[in-house]
Amino acid sequence: MAGNQKRPGATRKPGSKKGMRVGSGGQGRKALEGKGPTPKAEDRTYHVAHKRKVEAEQRAAKGARPGGGRKGAGGGAVGKKAKGGPEVIHGRNSVLEALRTKLPLKSVHVAAGIDHDDRTREAMALATEQGVPMFEAPRSELDRLADGHAHQGLAAVAPPHEYADLDDLLDAAAAKGHAPLIVALDGVTDPRNLGAIIRSAAAFGADGVVIPARRAASVTATAWKASAGAAARVPVAQVTNMTSALEELKRAGCFVVGLDAAGDTDVAKLHLAVDPLVVVVGAEGKGLSRLVRETCDLIASIPITAAAESLNASVATSIALYEIAKRRAA
């Protein structure tokens, strides 16, 4: 309508009329051409796979490890990472025991207006001595921190454990100048067993412990306490696949020996004891899994009387490590 022609914006701007577009004349043809296949991840310098490839090449350039094998680049370890979130320790006895064993704690939380006893006073003294930050908080805050569990007015926060990788265990043996001795746990689920095994590994000169990332005990406050502080000295590698990790250790020159009651070799007479060695211990009750058993070079046993069906995983590990340490010292 005529009246609308005076409305702001009703007038078409010059050059805005739609019409035929001029062609590119082939100038954009290159943009349509393919750039070739996508490079492999290990060939892309910004990719983590490239970094792993470079590290593997550098390790290979340094030569073979003690034991005659070179380490492969496949990798079974999760790596030097702190898995999971912080762990909350609650209760006066538990917090005090954690401080006595020098578990690395992030903080200690004390309820406001708490009735102190010998345990809380010692816990606060140890926290001060070890430089652990202490906070006074209302009971409601401790209830939230302990997720509703009984805390008796005292709780502590422990950071997630920092795991090693398989390289660290082999490097530890190289630094000591002896053939590697590593303990691998095939599905041990009790953290107290794990802690006791770490303690035995420290006592008999093992270079580290390998554990699965799933369906197995991890290094928690319970395992740390059972290790009597040995978890601070013995590296623990957490791997995504135990069979792959054992194959990797075999490529590095290690022999893999499984412990099982049905083994045909007495662990006290193990001729491989002085060689680079991985001792594999099965889960409580179930023993070695099929794939892990098939990966082992040898199955050894600990002779026991017929009255006992089996040995506890940590006890069996201690006996095996003692026998191996004795043969190595001979």
Image (spheres, rainbow, N blue to C red):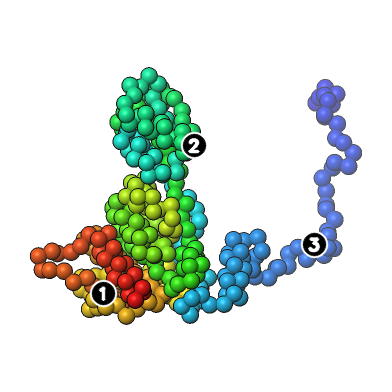
Q: Kindly tell me whether residue 265 is visible in this rendering.
A: yes
Q: What amino acid type is highlighted by mark number 2?
A: Gly
**Residue located farthest toward the front when viewing the structure as drawn:** 330
Apparent side of residue 112 relative to residue 262 in the rendered image (left or right): right
**Number of other residues with Cα within 10 Å of mark 2, as a class: few under 14, some 14 to 19, many 20 or more:** few
Q: What amino acid type is highlighted by mark number 3?
A: Gly
Q: Secondary structure at mark 3?
A: loop
Say which residue appears at 32% left-offset and 29% top-offset.
Answer: 118
Image disc number at residue 268:
1
Query: Could you tell me residue 241's position as x and y percent?
Result: 40, 64
> Residue tagged by mark 3?
28
The one of 313 and 181 positioned closer to us in this rendering: 181
The quadrant where residue 113 appears: top left
Between discs 3 and 1, the one toward the N terminus: 3
Say which residue appears at 46% left-offset and 30% top-offset.
Answer: 134
Quadrant of the image containing the C terminus: bottom left
Between discs 1 and 2, the one toward the N terminus: 2
Vertical order, 165 against 142 (above or below) = below
Q: Secondary structure at mark 1?
A: helix
- For the image, the number of numbered tags is 3
